[in-house]
Amino acid sequence: MIDPDTLKKQLSHRDLEITLAYAAEHTTKRPKVDCRYLITKEETCPICHGEKYLQNPIWTEFIESVTDENGKVDMVEYDRRYEEEFPDWNPPEEEPCYECEGEGIITQKTNLIEALLHFGLLKAIS
């Protein structure tokens, strides 16, 4: 297996384009098994912004209901309402993000050619 850093040093962007274009034009043998090369694409979760957790909607609604017009929490109202709404249960303040399942990143498999095109390492052949 070729080390990616070594390959990067050995091939310029132009060399890679020429090599892939030549291979596409001159390959007559097709693999017996249909295969494709995939790489992993990771990006920060757009919902939790990499924080992994979201505030529990129950808490969001509760805090908004005891916050005055100046943005301050009325602690007397907080204590009264808390005992009233949650007498036997303490809901968690945060829960794992539903989009990334608490990982903070979204992982996707992407086609190698698409990744090379995205980074400008390969030009689309039309």
Image (cartoon, helix red, strand yellow):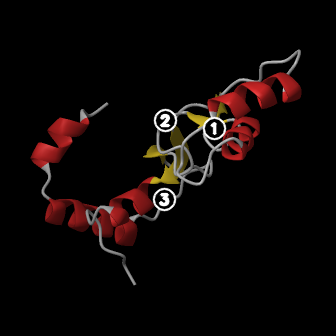
Secondary structure at badge 2 equals: loop
**Could you tell me which quadrant the C terminus lies in?**
bottom left
The tag on residue 9 is none
Query: Residue 103: x percent and y percent?
Result: 55, 31
Marks 3 and 1 in Cβ contact (< 8 Å) = no
Residue holding disc 2:
51
Question: Is 101 in front, or is 42?
Answer: 101
Please tell me which residue is depicted at 17% across the width and 61% down the height of the picture: 13
Residue holding disc 3:
29
Secondary structure at badge 1 equals: loop
Marks 1 and 2 in Cβ contact (< 8 Å) = yes
Marks 3/1: CA–CA distance: 47 Å
Which residue of the protein is positioned furthest toward the front in this rendering? 76
Residue holding disc 1:
97
Marks 3 and 2 in Cβ contact (< 8 Å) = no
Amino acid carrying label 2: it is: Glu
Question: Is 54 in front, or is 11?
Answer: 54
Q: In this view, does 101 lie above or below 87?
A: below
Amino acid carrying label 3: it is: Lys
Question: Is 13 in front, or is 45?
Answer: 45
Marks 1/2: CA–CA distance: 8 Å
Marks 3/2: CA–CA distance: 48 Å
Amino acid carrying label 1: it is: Cys
Label 1 vs 2, first from the N-terminus: 2
Query: Residue 26: x percent and y percent?
Result: 36, 68
Q: In this view, does 39 lie above or below 75?
A: below
Label 3 vs 2, first from the N-terminus: 3
Quadrant of residue 22 within the rendered picture: bottom left
Relative to residue 56, is residue 85 drawn left or right?
A: right
Q: Dot 2: few (<14), some (14–19), or many (≥20) neighbours within 10 Å?
A: some
Q: Which of marks 3 and 2 is in front?
A: 2
